[in-house]
Image (spheres, helix red, strand yellow):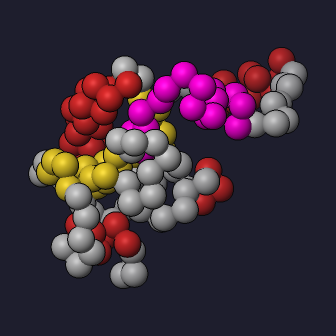
């Protein structure tokens, strides 16, 4: 497989590892958006969150929680972002969680600023989506 994150986990590409758990690793992002930008990635190759086992998922998000506390010491605020699939903006098809320290006036905004054309849904459309997603 020609996955950069799989190569990093295998030790084929040098990186600045921060922490390792049973199923995941954290490292400094090679192309940081802010000082202290961290990635948390599962060791096994999965493109989307829903492809991971429950054990891998629990491990990954426990690792994210731990590293968020560390990243938060930099500025006091951390953006946590996941692009779950290519259409969601995922550039490397291996799940990875971005932890980006945020500062006031850092040129990034809220998630709602990413979308220039928010949707307007009718009551019927809202109910349809609700029915599809409700557990």
In the depicted structure, whether residue 107 falls above or below residue 31: above
Image point (72%, 31%), residue name: 113
Mark count: 0
Task: Work out whether residue 116 or residue 62 is closer to the camera in this orientation and state it.
Answer: 116
Task: Work out whether residue 67 or residue 132 is closer to the camera in this orientation and state it.
Answer: 67
Quarter holding the N terminus?
A: bottom left
Say if the magenta span includes residue 103. yes
Asked if residue 53 can be seen in this view, the reply is no
Task: Work out whether residue 123 or residue 66 is closer to the camera in this orientation and state it.
Answer: 66
Residue 96, horizontal then vertical, whole percent:
39, 52
Q: Is residue 93 left or right of residue 46?
A: right
Image point (14%, 51%), residue name: 20
In the depicted structure, whether residue 22 falls above or below residue 80: below
Say if the magenta span includes residue 99. yes
Residue 43, horizontal then vertical, whole percent:
24, 60
Residue 111, horizontal then vertical, whole percent:
63, 31
| Residue farthest bottom in this picture | 1
In the depicted structure, whether residue 52 falls above or below residue 115: below
- Residue 59 figure quarter: top left
Which region is colored magenta? 98-114
In the depicted structure, whether residue 8 falls above or below residue 75: below
Asked if residue 63 can be seen in this view, the reply is yes
Residue 39, horizontal then vertical, whole percent:
35, 49
Image point (37%, 20%), residue name: 76
């Amino acid at each position: 497989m020609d996955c950069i994150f799989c190569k990093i986990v295998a030790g084929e590409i040098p990186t600045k590892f921060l922490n390792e758990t049973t199923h995941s690793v954290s490292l400094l992002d090679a192309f940081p958006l802010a000082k202290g930008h961290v990635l948390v990635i599962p060791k096994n190759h999965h493109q989307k969150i829903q492809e991971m086992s429950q054990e891998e998922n629990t491990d990954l998000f426990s690792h994210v929680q731990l590293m968020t506390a560390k990243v938060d010491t930099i500025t006091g605020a951390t953006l946590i972002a996941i692009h779950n699939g290519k259409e969601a903006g995922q550039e490397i098809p291996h799940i990875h969680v971005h932890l980006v320290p945020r500062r006031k006036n850092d040129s990034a905004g809220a998630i709602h600023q990413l979308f220039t054309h928010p949707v307007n849904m009718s009551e019927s459309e809202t109910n349809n989506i609700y029915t599809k997603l409700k557990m």
